[in-house]
Image (spheres, helix red, strand yellow):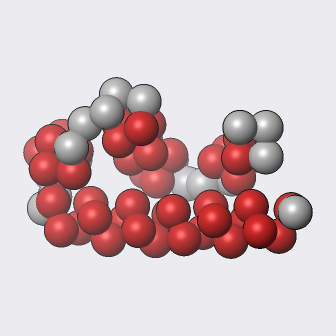
Amino acid sequence: FHSLAPLIAGLDDRDRHIIHLRFVEELTQAEIGERLGCSQMHVSRLLARTMKRLRAGLLETD
Protein backbone atom coordinates (compact mmCIF):
# COMPACT_ATOMS: atom_id res chain seq x y z
CA PHE A 1 0.00 0.00 0.00
CA HIS A 2 2.80 2.43 0.86
CA SER A 3 4.33 1.98 -2.59
CA LEU A 4 0.98 2.35 -4.32
CA ALA A 5 -0.28 5.49 -2.53
CA PRO A 6 2.06 7.99 -4.25
CA LEU A 7 1.30 6.42 -7.63
CA ILE A 8 -2.44 6.79 -7.07
CA ALA A 9 -1.91 10.37 -5.89
CA GLY A 10 -0.17 11.07 -9.20
CA LEU A 11 -3.22 10.04 -11.23
CA ASP A 12 -5.61 12.63 -12.60
CA ASP A 13 -8.88 13.21 -10.74
CA ARG A 14 -11.01 11.07 -13.06
CA ASP A 15 -8.72 8.04 -12.88
CA ARG A 16 -8.41 8.37 -9.09
CA HIS A 17 -12.20 8.61 -8.81
CA ILE A 18 -12.69 5.49 -10.96
CA ILE A 19 -10.16 3.56 -8.85
CA HIS A 20 -12.03 4.67 -5.72
CA LEU A 21 -15.41 3.61 -7.10
CA ARG A 22 -14.10 0.23 -8.24
CA PHE A 23 -11.90 -0.82 -5.34
CA VAL A 24 -13.20 1.14 -2.34
CA GLU A 25 -16.94 1.33 -3.08
CA GLU A 26 -16.70 -1.98 -4.97
CA LEU A 27 -18.97 -0.88 -7.81
CA THR A 28 -19.13 -2.84 -11.05
CA GLN A 29 -17.86 -1.31 -14.26
CA ALA A 30 -21.47 -0.91 -15.41
CA GLU A 31 -22.38 0.95 -12.20
CA ILE A 32 -19.35 3.21 -12.59
CA GLY A 33 -20.35 3.90 -16.18
CA GLU A 34 -23.86 4.88 -15.06
CA ARG A 35 -22.44 7.31 -12.48
CA LEU A 36 -20.00 8.86 -14.95
CA GLY A 37 -22.31 8.86 -17.95
CA CYS A 38 -20.22 6.54 -20.11
CA SER A 39 -20.33 2.92 -21.21
CA GLN A 40 -19.08 -0.08 -19.27
CA MET A 41 -16.61 -0.70 -22.10
CA HIS A 42 -15.14 2.79 -21.70
CA VAL A 43 -14.79 2.23 -17.95
CA SER A 44 -13.09 -1.09 -18.69
CA ARG A 45 -10.58 0.61 -20.99
CA LEU A 46 -9.90 3.39 -18.49
CA LEU A 47 -9.35 0.88 -15.67
CA ALA A 48 -7.07 -1.27 -17.82
CA ARG A 49 -4.97 1.75 -18.80
CA THR A 50 -4.77 3.00 -15.22
CA MET A 51 -3.90 -0.43 -13.80
CA LYS A 52 -1.17 -0.82 -16.42
CA ARG A 53 0.28 2.55 -15.38
CA LEU A 54 0.16 1.61 -11.68
CA ARG A 55 1.81 -1.78 -12.32
CA ALA A 56 4.58 -0.10 -14.33
CA GLY A 57 5.10 2.40 -11.51
CA LEU A 58 5.37 -0.37 -8.94
CA LEU A 59 7.94 -2.20 -11.06
CA GLU A 60 10.03 0.98 -11.33
CA THR A 61 10.13 1.44 -7.55
CA ASP A 62 11.30 -2.14 -6.84
Quarter of the image with the C terminus in it:
bottom right
Rendered image quadrant of residue 53: bottom right
Q: Percent position (x, y) of residue 37? A: 14, 51
Q: Percent position (x, y) of residue 54? A: 62, 61
Above or below — where is 50 with respect to 8? below
Rendered image quadrant of residue 55: bottom right
Q: Residue at x 50, y 46 (%)?
A: 16
Q: Taking 14 as reference, is 9 left or right?
A: right
Q: Percent position (x, y) of residue 7? A: 70, 52
Q: Percent position (x, y) of residue 10? A: 69, 53
Q: Residue at x 60, y 54 (%)?
A: 11
Q: Taking 27 as reference, is 17 left or right?
A: right
Q: Taking 44 as reference, is 7 left or right?
A: right
Q: Residue at x 32, y 71 (%)?
A: 45
Q: Residue furthest right?
A: 62
The count of marks equals 0
Q: Taking 45 as reference, is 61 left or right?
A: right
Above or below — where is 32 with respect to 45? above
Q: Residue at x 21, y 43 (%)?
A: 28
> Closest to the observer: 30 or 1?
1
